[in-house]
Amino acid sequence: MIESDAVIKFAVVGLGHIGKRHATMVQEHPEAELVALVDVMSKEDLGLSDLDVPLFPDVESMLSAGIDLDVVNICTANGLHSAQALKALEHKKHVVVEKPLGLYTANCEQVISTALNVSRQVFCVMQNRYSPPSIWLKGLMDEKKLGEINMVQLNCYWNRGDQYYKKGSWKGTKEMDGGSLFTQFSHFIDMMYWLFGDITDINARFENFGHKDSTEFEDSGFVTFKFVNGGMGSLNYSTAV
Ligand SMILES: NC(=O)c1ccc[n+]([C@@H]2O[C@H](COP(=O)([O-])OP(=O)(O)OC[C@H]3O[C@@H](n4cnc5c(N)ncnc54)[C@H](O)[C@@H]3O)[C@@H](O)[C@H]2O)c1
């Protein structure tokens, strides 16, 4: 367990766009210390030459290096999250994992059950839950101020141009990205579950309108379902707007 008055020691895995933010936030917090980095790229290529923290080429070598460490932050491509989180848990580390927790239910369940077995915490980054409008809406729901809700509509209409899906990147691939419901819209789906609970009887229709040459998955969909707690809902999404 982490002592409440101790400095918490973090390692960041994946020092790209979001991993650099994790590293900065850890360094700026008075009760946190950045003790290790993991990336397949060199410090020079990552633009982190000035960062005086050891860099390892993979999670296993970092975890086996005997570094005093409490938390591992997983900030790699979606398809790597659950396997890297499991490795950290097996070494009895707490885990902060960027969304999504994994691309398959079975892998996510394995992460959660391993965390319980080794008595460590797993936190999936769903920062939108902490925004003032979300907290306000959750309060309204918990106090049942809106009465009975029978129909919920979640509409996510975004644009991701071809420049976003660069050749050689994990973005747009089935194996490492998984699709827009993971990379773009998981925050909103999480919010819907948080407010209205689990869903069942799911039907869906998908289409790739704008990214046939740049993604291995559909960019748009209409999804309908029932809520286990009663009522029905729809999720309509696209990144081709
Ligand atoms: N919470 C949010 O709102 C939010 C926002 C953006 C991205 N994300 C998530 O953060 C994750 C990373 O996204 P990004 O935009 O920073 O990607 P990115 O491509 O900029 O960074 C990924 C990094 O991982 C490194 N990497 C690749 N393979 C590795 C391996 N085996 N071990 C260690 N490092 C490896 C790459 O070299 C790169 O530096 C994604 O899962 C994404 O969904 C979350």
Image (cartoon, grey):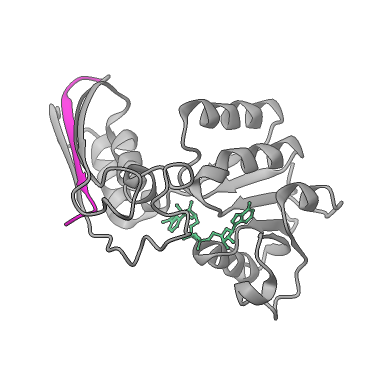
Q: Residue furthest front?
A: 213
Q: Position of residue 83 (x, y in %)?
A: 62, 38
- The answer to whether 74 appears left or right of 212 in the picture is right
Q: Nearer the viewer, residue 70 or 155?
A: 155
Residue 97 % position (x, y): 55, 47
Is residue 232 in the magenta section? yes
**Residue sitting nearer the eye, 65 or 214:** 214
Q: Is residue 80 magenta?
A: no
Q: Quadrant of residue 42?
A: bottom right
**In this view, 109 is above or below 179:** above
Can residue 147 be seen by looking at this rendering? no
Say whether residue 30 is left or right of residue 174: right
Direction bottom: furthest residue: 50
Task: Identify the image quadrant of residue 56.
Answer: bottom right
Residue 76 lies, in percent from the top left, at 56, 53
Asked if 89 appears above or below 162 in the picture, the reply is: above
Q: Which stretch appears magenta?
A: 229-241
63 or 45: nearer the viewer: 45
Residue at image location 57% in from the left, 38% down from the top: 82
Residue 64, horizontal then vertical, whole percent: 83, 47
Count of picture labels: 0
In this view, the residue farthest toward the right is 66
**Residue at (73%, 35%) from the top-left corner?**
90
| Left or right: 65 as drawn, with respect to 185 | right
Name the quadrant of the N terminus. Answer: top right
Whether residue 224 is visible here, answered yes or no, is yes
Image quadrant in which the C terminus is located: bottom left
Q: Nearer the viewer, residue 140 or 98?
A: 98
